[in-house]
Image (cartoon, rainbow, N blue to C red):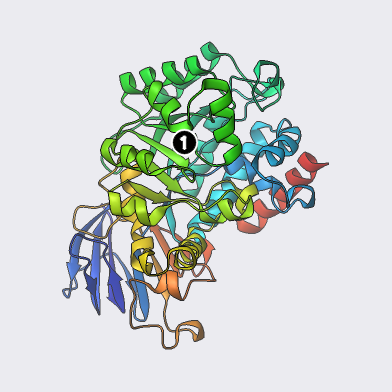
Amino acid sequence: MTTMLIKNAKAIVTLDKEDRVLASQNIFIRDNRIEYLGPDSPVAAEVIDAAGMFVYPGLINTHHHLYQTFTRNLPQVQNLELFPWLCALYEIWRGLTPEIVYYSAIVGMGELMKYGCTTCFDHHYVFPKLNSQQFIDQQFAAAGQLGIRFHASRGSMSRGKSSGGLPPDELVQTVDEILKDSERLVAEYHDNSRYSMRQVALAPCSPFSVTSDLMKETAALARAKKVRLHTHLAETKDEEEYCQQKFNLRPLAYMESLNWVGSDVWFAHGIHFNEAELKLLAATKTGVAHCPVSNQKLSSGIAQIPRMLELGVPVGLAVDGSASNDGSNLLGEIRTAFLLHRLHASAQAPTGYDILKLATTGSATLLGRDDIGSLEVGKAADLFMINGNTLEYVGAQFDPKSLLATVGVFRPAAYTIINGKVVVKDGRLCTIDEEKITAQANALVNKLIG
């Protein structure tokens, strides 16, 4: 049994139902859960002096493509929109190997942790014909090495170019192959217990890369196994036109016809929904992972987040793939989301604190979890701390709830704690040798890119 006391924090932003901010108070952790918040100082084996620190619940990332970490900042794709961007990168991604998947996961999740993220969901859907059977296993191994709470998905593509899809035929699999591996991964890795460190979702890639049969059978399997469903949807006008030409339906209507709406489903992006579709999402509690940086870089559009929140659509925050974001920093996403919607919606935009809620309690809802996302007794001991006694935060102490969005954070966290363990201290990862991993990863990048 281990105990930890985080004492005398400048402000603890709890994200609880009362939106409390606790000044000059303490957090007591026993093993992997929060046991006490308040002015008392229980005796603990490990004590962290949080004087001057702003303390927040760990951030929760609801959509990523970790394998893309090795294809960032490539000049040949920087001015492309989604469909041509994908077509160009598929030619590189066909070179993925288990080693590349492992190290790209270490790098991507490591960066997330350094910037306050404690739970990562990843959507891996690229499986070359050879040597890709253990890709998701490699991601779980990387997450275990880092100590991050990890939700993997068994993504998939089953409709290649020869069948009217976007990806090369060399990167698609049969429905039987996909379902068999989906069952294996759920059986081997999915843990739905409280404070679980690893879970599995099923996630066919997108309407333009999978067949209707795969979508239907995946939904049936997920519900039989009691795991969640995820896919890209309503990301671009090109996708909308594809669905109307191929299925004579708009993207969400197509999903509804396949039994892909409900409180166990969340979509990445959700930019091009009309009013009726937004109301359907709200009525069915179908969620949306908001990816503002990626949506801007690929010129995809602006999701109607103010209206979604007004209607009660479940919304979380996400960085999306490293190749369409060029980073894995959810703190950066918070500020970007805040400024984007201020520009677009003015007084109707979410506040800075509203955006923080998307990245914590909102994201927890998308992942189907009530044990993470806030700092409360009985919740998982997932949190991060920002040192407020630095030049960047002079005069910024008046609204800790909004600070991450309005002022922003541009350096790694002072501490990140996951499941009651310190995994980042003074901006450095505690669980791996950063220099060694960096050198190994860069060597693999050069091998992949050629």
Side (left or right) of 278 relative to 61 = left
Marks counted in the figure total 1
Reply above or below: 390 against 332.
below
Question: Please, what is the three-letter code of the amino acid marked with disc 1?
Answer: Ala
Extreme residue in the top direction: 176
Q: Position of residue 308 (x, y in %)?
A: 35, 50
* Image location of residue 42, percent across then percent down: 18, 69
Residue 432 shows in this picture: no
Where the C terminus falls, by quadrant? top right
Question: Dot 1, crowdedness within 10 Å: few (<14), some or many (≥20)?
Answer: many
Residue 338 coordinates in the image, percent (x, y): 45, 65
Seen in the image, is 438 located left or right of residue 337? Answer: right
Q: Nearer the viewer, residue 375 or 433?
A: 375
Nearest the eye: 380 or 326: 326
> Residue at image x 39%, y 50%?
316
To which residue does mark 1 refer?
Answer: 152
Q: Where is 352 relative to 382, above or below?
A: below
Q: Nearer the viewer, residue 384 or 253?
A: 253
At x 18%, y 57%, the residue is 377
Q: Is residue 34 left or right of residue 331?
A: left
| Relative image position of residue 84 (x, y in whole percent) | 71, 39
Q: Secondary structure at mark 1?
A: strand
Q: Does residue 189 appear in this view? A: yes
> Is 314 situated above or below 208?
below
411 to 333, vertically: above or below:
below
